Amino acid sequence: MVAEVNTAMKELEGLCEQLGMEDTKSSLCAGRKKLTNHKFSVGFMGEFKRGKSTVINALLGQEIMPADILACTATMNRVTYDLTPHAQVLLSDGRTVEVPIDQIKDYVTKLTKESERQAESVDEAIVYFPCPFCQNSVDIVDTPGLNDDDRMNRISEQVIPKLDAVIMVVVPGAPFGKSEADFVRTKLLASDLGRLMFLVNKIDTIRPRERERCVQDIRNRIRTAVLDKMKEVYGSDSREYEEAEGKMGDIRIFPISAADALDGRLEGDDSLVEESGILAFEHALKDMLTIERGILELAMPLAAVTRAANEVVQIAQTRKDSLQLDSEEFAKRQEQALLKIKGIREDKRQEISRIRKAEKNARTVLLPTAASFYQELEQKLMNVLENVRIDEATLSTEAGKAAAAQILEQRVNEAMQEELSHFCERTKSKVMEYVGNEAERMANFALELGNSLEQVRMGLSGGENRDSKALMTDIASVAFDAVTNGVGLFGLSGAIKGYQLAGGKGAAVGLGVGVATTIGVACVMAPLGVVGLPLCFIGGLAAQKAGGLAVKNLFRGSINHKAYLGIIERLRTSVKDMINDLRRDQQVDQYVTRLTEEGFGHLSAMMEAECEKVLRETEMTIAQIQTDIAKNELQKKQDVEKYSEIMKSAKQLMDNLLPVLNKVNDSRKVKAV
C-alpha cells in the first residue's frame, strides 16, 4: 500500500511539473520521502528485573539481548531489520564499533565492573537481525530498568519522546507499584496511554486459577493511577476526568511468560509457545505495526494526494478553457484576477493579525497561572517536609545522616517533578484548546479562500466547466473522509480536521482510543509545538532546585530531636528561598510564553505558507495562460489535448488508489469501533 501511494505521489509530481505547480510538487516530494523513510519505534520499558530483554528475545526467537538474574541492561539497545545478523555500538565520542552479536553484552550490561565502565561510554547499541516484527522500518528498543540508578532513568526518559509506542512490562510479584504508577502518571502521561500496552510477564509464577484475578488487579491499579492523576491535574468534576474515566476500559494488557515463550522457540515446542500467552500479544503488536501504523502513516499522504489531484484538475481546466479567449479579453480578466489576489493577501494579513491577537489573549489568561503555581508548589513542598518521618536514632551515625539527607532531597525532587508535570499538563491542555479554537475559526477563512480562488479561476476561464466539476466530484468520491473533508481548500484543512476529530481537550486526554487515533492527532498537533511534556525541563529544573537545598550540609555534628526540628525549619526557609529564586528566574513563566508562542506561531506560519502556496500557483497559472494565448492555433490545439490528458491522468491515478483508500478507511472505522 505504501508503494502504491508512493507511486501515485510520484506520478502527481510529474503532472504538477507539467503545469508549473512547483510548490505542490515540492510538498508531494517531501511527503513521499517522509512516508518512505519514517522509522516506527516500539520501546520496552519497566523497572529492572521485569524481563524486558527476555520478552524481546522471545520475539526474536533467539537469545540476542543480554538477560540475567541480576539487573543487567545499562544502555539503550535497538533492534532493527537486516538479513545478516550483526551489531554496532555507538560511542559517546562519536565513534562506531562493529561487534559480533555474541559479544554485545560486553558493551551494554553492568554484570561486571569492566562492562559497566564500558557501558558508560556507550550512547546506543544497534542489533541488526531478521526479526519479522522489525520489517518495514520498525525498531524495537530495549531500555535500562527504571529506578535502577539515576543514569538509567535519564537514558529511559530521554528516549520516551522518540518512541511511537511503549510496551510497559510488569510482573505479578510487584504488580504495578507506586514507582511504575508514578512513571506512567508523570512521564508517559494520561494523554499518551493510547500508544501504550502492558505486559504482565512471569505469569507462570502464579497459579493458573489466580492469573485472571492478578491481571484484573493490575488493570485496576493502572486505572486508579491514571484517574488519580487526572483528578489531581483537572479535578474530578472536569470534562477531562469524565473522558478519561469513560475510556479506561480500553487498556491493552497481556499476561505472558517470556521465558517459556523463548524456551519453546529455542526447542521448537509450539505447545509451550502457545501456553506462554505470547501469541495474543504478538497479534496485537502485529496489528499496531500494520493496521494502526498504516492508518497513521497513510492517512495524511492520501489526503495530500487527493488535494493535489483536485488542484491539478482545477488548474488544467482553467488553462484549457482560457485558450478560447483572445489577448484583449484575457488582459481584462487578468487585471481583475490580480486585484482579487491582492485582496486575498490583505485578508490573509488580517487573519494572521487575528491569530497574533488570540495568542496575546491566551498568554494574558495563562501567565497568572504561573504566578499561582509558585504558591501551590511552596505549599506542596512544605507538606512534604511536614510529613517526612525519619527515625532520629539513625541520625546518630554518619551513614544514617547521609541516608536522611538523601531521603529529604529525593522527596523534594519528586514533589517538584510531580507539580511541574501537573502544571505543564494543564498548561498544554489549555494551549491546545486555545489553538484548536483558533484553528476551527480559521476553517471559515479556508472556505472563503477556496471560494475566492474558484472565482478567480472561473473569471480567467470564462465560467464553470461541467467536465472539470465531474472529474473533481469523482476524485472527491474516493477521498479518505477522516482527513480530506475540505480537501479542495488548502493544507491547513488537515490540521483543522485533526482538532475536529479529537477536540482540543480530547486530544490532550486521548485515552485508550488506539495508537492510530492518538498518534494520528499527535502528528497533526506536533507541528504546532504543543504535544508532550518537556521532560528535560521538568526533570532538570526539579533536580537543579532540589539539589540547591544543600540538605547534606545541615546534617553535621550531634543531632537530637531539637536539632532535627531545627534542620526541618531551616529547610522550610530554604524551600521558600528556592521558590523565590524560581519566581525571579521566571522559568515557568517562560515555559508558558514559549508554549503559546510556538502554538500560535506555527498556526500563523502554516496559514502564511499555505495561502502563499496557492496564491503563487494561481499567479503562475495566470502567467502561463498569457504565454499559451500568444501561441499559434496548432500549438493551442496541442495544449488543449495536453490539459485534457492531464485531467484524465489525475482521475485515473485516483481510481487506481481507490482500493488503498477503501482499505485504510475501513481499517480506521474498525479501530474507531
Image: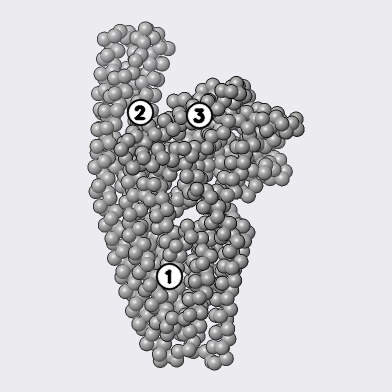
What is the x, y in percent for residue 362?
Answer: 28, 50
Give the residue type at disc 2.
Ala
What is the x, y in percent for residue 620?
Answer: 45, 76
Give the quarter of the image for residue 188: top left
Closer to viewer: mark 3 or mark 1: 3
The tag earlier along the polypeptide, 2 or 1, is 2
Q: Residue at x 32, y 9 (%)?
A: 559
Tell me the CA gap for discs 3 and 2: 29 Å
Q: Nearer the viewer, residue 550 or 290?
A: 290
Mark 2 neighbour class, 10 Å CA radius: few under 14, some 14 to 19, many 20 or more:
some
Q: Secondary structure at mark 3?
A: helix
Q: Residue at x 45, y 50 (%)?
A: 521
What is the x, y in percent for residue 598?
Answer: 36, 51
Evaluate if marks 2 and 1 touch, with contact meaning CB atoms under 8 Å apart: no
- To which residue does mark 1 refer? 614
- To which residue does mark 3 refer? 216
Q: Is residue 225 left or right of residue 275?
A: left
Q: Residue at x 28, y 55 (%)?
A: 358
The tag earlier along the polypeptide, 3 or 2, is 3
- To which residue does mark 2 refer? 415
What is the x, y in percent for residue 22?
Answer: 50, 70
Give the residue type at disc 1.
Val
Q: Nearer the viewer, residue 539 or 636?
A: 636
Give the residue type at disc 3.
Gln
The tag earlier along the polypeptide, 3 or 1, is 3
Specify whether residue 275 is in view.
yes
Mark 1 neighbour class, 10 Å CA radius: few under 14, some 14 to 19, many 20 or more:
many
Query: Going by the picture, which residue comes out furthest to the front?
Result: 209
253 above or below 531? above
Evaluate if marks 3 and 1 touch, with contact meaning CB atoms under 8 Å apart: no
Image quadrant for the N terminus?
A: bottom right
Colour logic:
one colour
